[in-house]
Image (tube, rainbow, N blue to C red):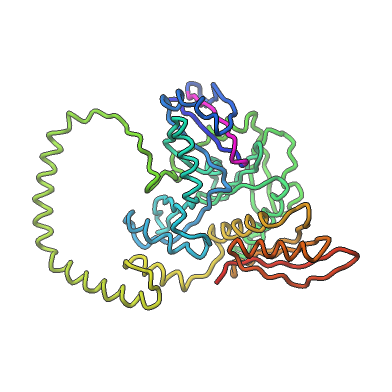
Amino acid sequence: MKDRLFIRLKSDEESLEWGLLTYEEAVPKLKERGELLLDDMIALADQASQQEVILLLPASRVRCFNVKAPTRNRKQLEKAVPYTLEEQVLDNVEQQLFALGSVNSDGMIAVNVVDKAYLSGVIDKLKEASVEPDFVVSDAACLPLFEDAWSLLEHDDAVLVRQSANEYWSTEVDMLADLMTWNLQSQFEESQTVSQAIRIYSPNEHTDLLAGVSGLAIQQAPVEDSFEWLCSQFSFSSINLLQQEFSSQKKNQVNLGQWKLPAIATSCLIGVGLIYLVSQIIVLSTQRANLEQQLIASVQEVFPNVNDVNTGLMQVSNRFSTLGGDAASTNSFMLLLDKSLAAINPQLIKVSQLEYLSSQAQLSFDVEASDYATLTAAQNKLESSGVQVEMRNASENGGVWSARIAVGVKQ
């Protein structure tokens, strides 16, 4: 197996770590590695031109969803899935890339969502340095998948967590316990189970991550080099974010000359068969087109912007569905949490008692500040980010103002 060049963007958005992974030994090893600023990526141009390039994005930039697939046609799914997730994504769906996995046996499809402007900026930055990735994926998607346990990696500036095939996220160390507690509470509400096994991979053999969280069966698995280990766990079964307009332009040079004549002959036979088939179904196609137009006209009475049948059916189905109980609920929570943390200055406001109501897609938490103006400023900043905000029970005690803030999706 050829060596692969791994590039992981750090959460500061300005630097990266890279490593050249070799498979010459039984266990993959990094034979070269380093850290760079994004502006200095030109140093990797020579290696990138000779090796397969795997780009790992911060998990905070990639949101995961699992939705019911109305069809197995890829092009139709690309059109329909954004409308299905419109209420959960919150942002303008036209500005988001919805990268699709494969449809499983239950008819569910895994979806990764990333901001187009962000992804385009990263890709352009790499191309300016003559570095073109073959595969782009969330760094947390590289964590191993287990049927009986979640997996967690403590690495550098983040904690990466993978719950299932398409449920992975990252957080800072001081937020990990709260998020895990919330996940356990959600799991209990869904399946009435109160425990969860988790495997913690960390360079620290005696890490105390999650030690204070009840209901967790923790198995520690020390790793000497967390970045090397993360790269070695990469699998092509993950969703490649290089889809649609971001598809890789790299070409695999394969000699197909010996298959040219057989391919031409096969194409001719297929063409004759298709002509006959089309002649037989043309009448049925006309009737189907008329029925589709009638269906679209009916759907547009409720959803004026829908222009095709599959999108219409998914919109109707989605209207009667409720949020919560799956990866969509987790990602709605993470998005509301990200917006809340971005609006609240931890040096001015103390946050505690997080609570998430999956049935209403609403995040609530207690806040404390030295004055009421600080709380209202945070409320205004949250509202300007596009979410619905309500501040309750504001009161002053001993020079400290406290309140309960509820953040939810705008209806």
Which residue is painted at 75% across and 53% down in the image?
A: 346
Is 350 within the magenta? no
Q: Dividing the picture into quarters, in which one does residue 73 lie?
A: bottom left
Residue 1 seen by the camera: no
Question: Magenta segment: does it hold 15?
Answer: yes
86 with respect to 221 (left or right)? left
Q: What stretch is highlighted in magenta?
A: 12-23
| Residue 124 higher or lower than 388, as above or below | above
So how many labels did they put on this image? 0
> Is 343 displayed left or right of 411 in the figure?
right
The quadrant of the picture occupied by the N terminus is top left
Along the line of sight, which residue is nearer the eye, 189 or 360?
360
- The picture places residue 98, in percent across and down from the top left corner, at 44, 53
Secondary structure, magenta segment, majority class: strand
Q: Where is residue 394 in the image (x, y as percent from the top left)?
A: 79, 71
Q: In this view, does 151 lie above or below 34?
A: below
Residue 152: percent from left, percent from top? 62, 43
